[in-house]
Amino acid sequence: MFNIHTYPTHPFPDQRAGTSGLRKKTQVFAQPGYLENFVQATLDTLDEDPQRTWRNHTVILGGDGRYHNDEAIRTILGMAAAHGVRRVVVGRAGILSTPAASHLVRLRQARGALILTASHNPAGPEGDFGIKISVSGGAPAPESLTEAIHARSCVLEEYSVATIPEPDLGHPGEYRAGNMTVEVIDSVADYAQLMESLFDFDAIAALIGNQSFRFLYDAMHGATGPYARAILGQRLGAASESMIRTDMLPDFGGEAPDPSLQHAHQLVLSLYDRNPPDFGAASDGDGDRNMILGPGLMVPPGDSLAIIAANADVAPGYRQPLRGIARSMPTSRAADRVAAAKGVPLYETPTGWKFFCNLLEDQRISFCGEESFGTSSSHAREKDGLWAVLFWLNIIAVRRQSVSEILARHWQQYGRDFYLRHDYEGLDLETADTLITRLRDNLGNLPGETVAGERIEKADAFRYVDPVTGETATGHGMRVLFADDSRLVFRLSGTGTAGATLRIYGEKHERDAARHGLPPATVLAKLMHRARLIAAIPELTGREQPSVAVG
Ligand code: VG1
Ligand code: CO
């Protein structure tokens, strides 16, 4: 029986996507009609453009398996059937990592995807839930689209859901749901094949098979678990004890699935212990972030991007000449130095993957990355955690150098861009707003001023003009450049679900190799002090210290 029911709805004015999709407390998402309202607003907005509509087309659906994943999948299938979507390709058990979903959109020439995830945020009834929207080509929805969806969500009066048979998502196969086909696929197979086409699997398998090389991969109970078991385990021969937390859990074991020194406890303990493995890595809940570790060290994400670009030719998928490199504005300028040395353009974009995608589509860049543990290439339109892990393994296998040697040599050649991020989490919205407004109003007065012994050269609000579309993006942060070429960036997070988070990014280039081993916190202590003075942080927030320091 195929019945379409239409229900009245009312505006949810908070349905505005942030840096990466719509992210809210699970309880907000679980309100009656909340998910439905957002999905209907998305379907209706896309429907306005015949090139974009999902009606009569194929779409991809999956999530990172967090609490509420199953229910959301069921609702979306019913809504897709009611809307006249022709085919929905769903990962087995409703599971797809974000990069795998992006790849599937491309592979299946789908009109887009809905990915159910709040990324590295904790899950569960008290945690977070979210939806990322991809468009054709596999890119995250651009700002113009998410703004239109938000506008639509505010005037929506009804949504439609079809009653469809309970789909069996446990096994690959096809099911009819009214006029729609639900195709359940192996979540991993296509993505694994893509990875195999890009990297030197023989060299990596030989490295992993070598008794003297040990590594540890932490899937953090997130979406990369099944991918790691299939790719690192079955295809590359990694022993099962080389991988931890590969079983997916709806609450990620009660922790934030955030690949950081703060959250990947067991991995970090092991790499910083006596007799550590040679290589360590982790990925986040939805599989798009990565953290790379060597014995007693973490590879800073800005350096990881630069090193991958500088060593690209070790991987068979990257032997063609480097095109260009892009990094988000707050990411360190390490990649700029590689781009300059190779004579290719460097693009500085606002934070959030969507801004890289026009550059990728226009074939202007080969690699792109963010300081927030995100790196990827033209193979997908999302950042890709396991891809970065495989790239590092490929570099180690071919160069026959340790992680610390690779880093040290890179810094020797290009200098080291010392880097730190300070987050002030849980600020009340008004305080954060005041702080940002004051800072913006004062930017014009900063150049020429000396703050704690260093003169400010330049200060501006970042304005991005997309070189492909000509579209302008503003409100993505402020930059302060000092006479010694050190740099500060201030911006508010766009992924939080409670209060506001102020992020301050500091960096300073150092040529002297004798200083490359110093801790970033030491090298950048004065710079971060200047940041507190410039933004009047203690006065406005009452905070003497950031809640988190990353670097
Ligand atoms: C953060 C990071 C940003 C990243 C975004 C999504 O955004 O800073 O670089 O693209 O998360 O990451 P914000 O606005 O909180 O700084 V994820 O792994 O959702 O998909
Ligand atoms: Co993520």
Image: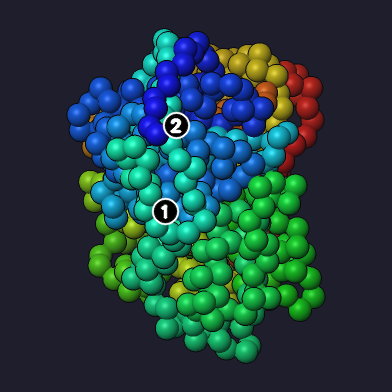
Graded by Cα atoms within 10 Å as few (under 14), some (14 to 19) or many (20 or more), the crowding at tag 2 reads some
Q: Which mark is residue 109?
A: none
Q: Nearer the viewer, mark 2 or mark 1?
A: 2
Q: Nearer the viewer, residue 486 or 434?
A: 434
Q: Residues within 10 Å of mark 1 (few under 14, many from 20)?
A: many
Query: How far across and down, in percent of the image, does residue 159 sit?
Result: 42, 19
**Residue type at tag 1:** Val
Q: Relative to 183, is 540 on the left or the right?
A: right
Examine the rendered structure and indicate whether residue 206 appears above or below residue 120: below
What colour scheme has been applied to the protein in the rendered image? rainbow
User: To which quarter of the image does residue 77 belong?
Assistant: top left
Name the residue rendered at 52%, 77% in the picture.
234
Please, what secondary structure does the residue beneath circle 2 have? strand
Query: What residue is disc 1 on?
Result: 184
Residue shown at 49% from the left, 71% from the top: 231
Reading the image, the residue beneath label 2 is 163
Foreground of the two, 153 or 312: 153
Q: Is residue 548 visible?
A: yes
Q: Amino acid at mark 2?
A: Thr
**In the image, farthest residue toward the bottom:** 211
Q: Earlier in the sequence, mark 2 or mark 1?
A: 2
Could you say where residue 136 lies in the image, as x and y percent from the top left? 29, 41
**Which is nearer the eye, 423 or 452?**
423
Name the residue nearer the viewer: 195 or 346: 195
Report x, y in % for residue 341.
35, 60
